[in-house]
Amino acid sequence: MASAAELGGDLSRLRHLNSLAVVDALRGAEPLTLTAVAERTGLSRPSTKDVVGRLVELGWVEEMGPAQGTVGRPARRYRFRADAGHVAGIDIGVHSVRAAVADLDGTVHAQTHRPVSPATPVDERIAAADRAVADCLAAVGLGRTDLWAVGAGTTGIVDRAGTVQYCAGVADWTGVDLADRIGALFPCPVQIDNDSRLAALAERERGVARDADDTVFLHAGRRTGAALVVGGRVHRGFGGVAGEVGMHPVTHWVTAASYLHDCPAVPPDVPKSDAARHTFAAARGGDPVAVAAVERYCDDLALGTSAMVMTLDPELVVLGGGFSRAADVLLPRLRRRLADVCLRVPELRASALGEECVAVGAIGRAVAYLDRELFGGAAGRIVPLPTLARGAEGGETREDSDTREGGENTGNTAAHHGLPGAPRHPGVRADRRDPGEQGAPGADRAAGGAR
């Protein structure tokens, strides 16, 4: 027979799993009634009522008014308070820096980009990322202290600590401690990873790969990269170089896009940043020179892709990045080339996220970090919403205000739990967790609600 302590631990874990199931049901959904939540989680209605009430007390769930046009006794509805906090995602690329700001559901509310070049100095590239995030925050009326976490993706090979180990496309980018540089800009934890892996994460969570556990993601644009999703999780590899087949000289991925950028079918006054679009358009129209350029590009793209397909045997290949807009031109040719050499050709799909894929993936990584911190703690414990203490007494206290402005905390709930909104230790510049940790739910959350 189980001891009282063992039984208590099991019950605590059961309550925790049920709470996570309810949070997952409410996130990203319209306000739901208790009956609807019970149906989605598989919990009994009494258990659902108990869990929802506890989440309301913790501040994560809010009771809403009845739906308009309701006949009879109105049913109470509930929503997850995704707007209680915000995260930012940054894409530090070779030719542009993109940023986006989202709520705790990962819903993007503002995005922007700033042009850079391969020769842009490190400090200016970092400053461009800083200004891009500032532009997004201004667009939605937020400040830096409203950010609870930041995710950032960069071209190049990134180690577990957030340092760029190698980058061929950006001047002086190799060796940059990006976790430190980006972490110094924001008063919250920062997650750093390779751009292609974050783009693959975005496709897995919010794109065309949501129903595929094994995927090859092609990050096709002015530069070409790739990432692998294995068993539903973005695969980092032991040294962080999984999917970097483009680094092998035999693939010619480093120079593959030059066929499109330097195509004679492109008018001479078109800037390099827009040249590929003209080549694709000309190929659609049957221009033989443009068609030849696209064919050569697909030859190179297929070489590295086939190597990954033969190794992983994926369910899906996703064409992402800026060139995904030309999927109608590229995918049929890529499919034919894979059919020539692969034992089994997976399904090929075009990304719907386009050039925003990295920033969206960075947001997903930031949200996943918060999920671990706020909902993935000890069994039976979900951290109270950081703003709950400020609103509990009917207004913000002086101590809370001082804390948010960087002063010494004297008892704020957020600081007590180490939550977003609390001042960081002066020596902490960024969260140094393994960037290979994924945004997908852990085993406990993936299992759904317990009864």
Image: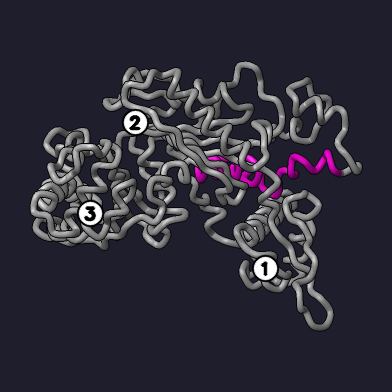
**Please, what is the three-letter code of the amino acid marked with disc 1?**
Val
Question: Which badge, 3 or 1, is on the more N-terminal residue?
Answer: 1
Based on the picture, tell me whether residue 383 belongs to the magenta stretch: yes
Do the numbered discs 2 and 1 sit on residues whose CB atoms are within 8 Å?
no
From the viewer's perspective, is residue 163 above or below residue 292? above
**Residue where numbered disc 3 is placed:** 281
Taking the spot 17% from the left edge, 55% from the top edge, the residue there is 283
Do the numbered discs 2 and 3 sit on residues whose CB atoms are within 8 Å?
no
Based on the picture, tell me whether residue 306 belongs to the magenta stretch: no
Q: Position of residue 288 (x, y in %)?
A: 8, 54
Q: How is the image coloured?
A: one colour
Judge the density around disc 2: few (<14), some (14-19), many (≥20) Cα neighbours within 10 Å: many
Taking the spot 36% from the left edge, 55% from the top edge, the residue there is 351
Q: Is residue 223 visible from the viewing direction of this image?
A: no
Q: Position of residue 250 (x, y in %)?
A: 11, 36
Q: Residue furthest right?
A: 393
Q: Camera-side residue: 246 or 101?
A: 101
Q: Camera-side residue: 445 or 104?
A: 104
Q: Quadrant of the C terminus?
A: bottom right
Question: Which badge, 2 or 3, is on the more N-terminal residue?
Answer: 2
Taking the spot 27% from the left edge, 54% from the top edge, the residue there is 326
Q: Which residues are magenta?
A: 363-391
**Residue where numbered disc 1 is placed:** 37
Q: Position of residue 247 (x, y in %)?
A: 21, 33
Residue 94, numbered circle: 2
**Please, what is the three-letter code of the amino acid marked with disc 3?**
Ala
Quadrant of residue 72 within the rendered picture:
bottom right
**104 lies left or right of 238:** right
Element at badge 2? Answer: loop
